[in-house]
Each structure stands twice: as structure tokens, then as C-alpha cells.
Image (cartoon, helix red, strand yellow):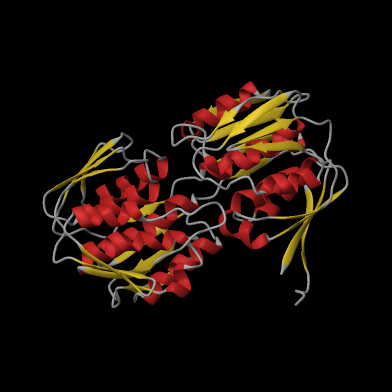
Amino acid sequence: MEQLEIQGGHSLKGSIRISGAKNAALPMLAATLLAQGAFRLRDVPCLEDVNIFIRLLEELGFKCKKEETGALLVDSSGLSSHEAPYELVRMMRASVLVLGPLTAGLGRAKVALPGGCAIGARPIDFHLKGLELMGAKLKLREGYVEVRARRLSGARIYFDIPSVTATENLMMAACLASGVTTLENAAREPEVVALGQMLQQMGAHIKGLGSETVKIEGVRQLSPVDWKIIPDRIETGTYLMAVGAAGGKLVLENTVPSHLDAVLEKLKNAGLVIDILDETTIRVKRRGRLKSVDVKTLPYPGFPTDLQAQIMVLMALAGGLSVITETIFENRFMHVAELRRLGADIRIEGRSAIVRGVSSLAGAPVMATDLRASACLVLAGLAAKGKTVVGGLNHLNRGYENMDEKLCSAGAVMKRVKIEETV
């Protein structure tokens, strides 16, 4: 078991390269189920969630190998199973992304129900209803969903709420279905668009990517591709906010500024100086104390829920009062209690956090409860006086590639420390 010891009070400087996006890599790994042969995926981040998904593909009969360049070779020609076991699905909810491709490619799938998670229930009802509309037969038993379909048929599918994973799952399934599938009120996130572009390169016929209506005309066969994962916009946003917490100036490379319009606008309003140097580079610096801004999480292109915890750190240090409203997940304020341990003045009212800025935070032991909460506590540790010890690094390892190393290269002072687990 590891924890991260952070000595606060050190401003950041230099540059950080943004890794490939976890939330793009996972559905793209699932898409390799749709074609037989050798795929090459570049800029795949080295993360625990990605490693679990690779293990799942290997369980299904794939061969996966990392090149010296860092690219991942995925050979899907050995696909021999249609079952995603609970032992792997319980470790990562995104494993449900194999449901659509397996059904479309093999005509059947057996996938463990993922259950709840720390930040909310996140049911897969949209996935199942969509497959039923496409003609699949479903059975729920012994904690698994079993799906069968000789060949899926095109259908009109409306999402009550834009769902990223449901949009991705059903878009993949529709690629090999007969006829045209229309996804209405579809998710518009850059990761969804990137998956669609990869599927188009594989031979899929898809229109409307990035809009609320996506149309997919099914084809008989798709082909493997060589593909680059898009940069992680959430990692980018986290490091932008790290400068807001610690001070200093950073250049973030290998990113896509246009994926962060809502975030950049909010951070500029809070007082950060942000310059877009080119299509892949952002410079950020902090001058003086930040200003309070209100934040409301929304589906893309709104402010992302995955950056709500991080901006709360900035508001905890800003001058004035801010209201942060969470509309996506019902239980995503668990980091508030830990921020209070560091001296933050925050109270919860329903789905809003009322944050009154304080002049400084003070280091203390804290525990991460989920992935983005872990990043939030690292940022708070950068800002706090004295030493902050962050536990629960298993969450951080799921979604940030070498975060401590990247921050240390930019002037932060922190180290991982192994501790013995107590019974």
C-alpha cells in the first residue's frame, strides 16, 4: 500500500506533456472486438484501468503487447470467448463497453453486471434497452446479463440523458447491424467523437459525430487500424488547476485546447492567465489571489463533472463565496470532508457545495475516495502549508499517468511512500 507525501508551498514551473486519454483508450480497446486482425494503438496511457481492460481482452482470447515506442499491439484474431467475468468487471465499470461489440461481432455476450460505485449508481439501463430495440434477446441471471442476436437491426434509440458509455456501446454495436441506427440525445464528448472517427477509419459509416443525433449505417465487416489516442482533457484541466493551487507558470504540451472551452473560460474568470500557444499547447500562470466563480457541472460542452473536485480546491482558496453544483452524479462530494481537514470552509446543501475562500490551507493526513477526489487532494496538498499525506493512491493510479513524477519535474515536492497494511 502506498501514500503520497506532499510538502506544500512550492510553485510550479516548466512544462508537462499530457498523456493519452483514459476515457478514449477504453472504448477504443473495446472497438478492437469488432474486427479480426492486428491493431496498433498509440499513446495508450499506462494506467490501472487500462491494464484491467487489457486483461479482459486477454481473457477473451486476445494477445496484447507493448512496443518499445509505447504503442500497444492488439491481436484480436484469437477471440474465443464471449464472457466478461465479474472478477474483472467489478474492478472497472467501463468493462461493460464490451457488451455491444461482443453482441455485434459474435452474436452473443455474457457480461457481469458492474453494480454501483463510490460516486453513484450509474446503471446500464440505456445500454440494455438500446440493444433490445436493435433486436437482441436479454436475460438477467446470477449477476450477469446474457445477450443473443443473430444480427442486430438498425433502430431509433433516444437517451433520456446523454450517456457517454451507452452512446459508445450502442454506436459500436450499430456498426455491424443491418440497416440504420439513429442515436438521439447522444453524448457529444470528444472521447465519443474520437471513437467514432476510429470506427470510420475501420470502415464504419457514421454521420453526426459531435452532435445530438448520430446515424450509423451498418456494414458487414470492419478492418483493424493503426490509431492514436487523443490527449486527456481531464488531465489537462487538472494541471491547469494545479497552477491555480500552487502558483507559478506551466506549459502543457500534447493537449487539445478546444476540448476545454468551458473550463478555460471559468479559469480565466477566476483570475488565471491562460494563453493558447498553438493547437496543442497551453500556457497557464497565476498572478495574485484567485477570484470566486460559480460552477455547475453539465454534459459536454459544459463544465465536466470530472473536474468538479479539482476546481473546488481553487475556490477553497479564492477570495469570496462560490457555489459548485453537481448535476451528473448524486454522490460526488465525498472529497469535501477531506478538504475540511485541511482547513477549507465548505458546506453541502443538496447537490451544491457552498465554498467560502480561506487565506490558506494546512497540511494533514487525508484519504482519497475516488479517482478525481484523489487528484483534488494532491492539488490541495500543493497549496497547503506543511506536509499533506494522501492515502488511497489506488484511485490515483487508475486515471493519472505518473502524476507525482510529472509534478515533481515541474517543481513540486512529493514522494510515494510504502506503508504496511494493518489488519
Q: Position of residue 270 (x, y in %)?
A: 66, 24
Asked whether, in this view, residue 326 is left or right of residue 422, the answer is: left
The residue sitting at the left extreme is: 179
Which residue lies at the image location 32% right of the left edge and 58% below the top edge? 31
Locate the C terminus and report the quarter of the image it occupies: bottom right
Q: Is residue 308 above or below residue 116?
A: above
Q: Position of residue 183 (x, y in %)?
A: 25, 42
Query: Which residue is at the front of the view, 54 or 349?
Result: 349
Q: Position of residue 210 (x, y in %)?
A: 33, 36
Can residue 411 be seen here? The reply is no
Q: Is residue 340 above or below residue 169?
A: above
Q: Is residue 279 above or below residue 92?
A: above
Asked whether, in this view, residue 289 is left or right of residue 146, the answer is: right
Which residue lies at the image location 42% right of the left edge and 71% below the top edge? 56
Asked whether, in this view, residue 379 is left or right of residue 262, the answer is: right
Count of labels in the image = 0
Which quadrant of the view contains residue 222? bottom left
Which quadrant of the view contains residue 18? top right
Q: Position of residue 422 (x, y in %)?
A: 77, 75
Can residue 213 be seen here? The reply is yes
Asked whether, in this view, residue 47 is left or right of residue 349, the answer is: left
The residue sitting at the right extreme is: 386
Locate the N terminus and report the quarter of the image it occupies: bottom right
Q: Is residue 381 above or below residue 298?
A: below
Which residue lies at the image location 63% right of the left edge and 63% below the top edge? 394
